[in-house]
Image: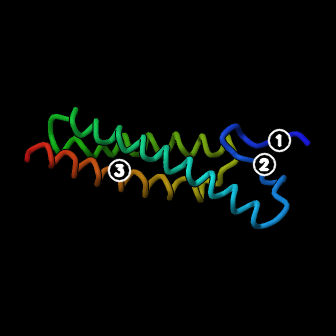
Amino acid sequence: MQNDAPHYAPVAASDCADMGALRAAIDELDRHLVALLAVRQTYMERAAQLKPRRELVRDEARVEEVVSRVVAEAARVGLSPAIAEPVWRTLIERCIAHELEAFDRRAL
């Protein structure tokens, strides 16, 4: 049987014969997501170093640009926008909070 899973998925969901296999595959995907989010965090920390003023940390136009791009990509790959949009809005808010903390540590 051909594996129709994306390269980062351990197996195709349709190849999981039981809940144990399905949960193991989900756990593996979660490990990848966490690793990617850790990398994303380093970019937020670098942004805090590069921005000259604290008020530049939050950029509403950029937030909407990112969300729009994510929703379009979600549609392209078959992810429900009802999942993608709120997940990314929450992610962005938490990243902004982290970036603000990193910015404030610069002054110490």
**Mark 1 / mark 3, whichever is N-terminal:** 1
Residue at screen point 82% across, 65% down: 18
Left or right, 54 with respect to 76, comes to left
**Mark 2 / mark 3, whichever is N-terminal:** 2
In the rendered view of the protein, which quadrant contains the N terminus? top right
Residue 45 x/y as whole percent: 28, 41
Alpha carbons under labels 2 and 3: distance apart: 31 Å
Alpha carbons under labels 1 and 3: distance apart: 35 Å
Left or right, 97 with respect to 92, comes to left
Alpha carbons under labels 2 and 1: distance apart: 6 Å
**Viewer-nearest of discs 1 and 3:** 1
Give the residue at mark 3. 95
**Mark 2 / mark 1, whichever is N-terminal:** 1
Give the residue at mark 2. 12
- Type of residue at label 3? Cys
Q: Residues within 10 Å of mark 2 (few under 14, many from 20)?
A: some
Q: Residues within 10 Å of mark 3 (few under 14, many from 20)?
A: many
What element does badge 2 sit on? Answer: loop
- Type of residue at label 2? Ala
Q: Residues within 10 Å of mark 1 (few under 14, many from 20)?
A: few
Residue at screen point 59% across, 59% down: 82
Residue 34: numbered disc: none
Residue 3: numbered disc: 1
Q: Are marks 2 and 1 in contact (CB under 8 Å)?
A: yes
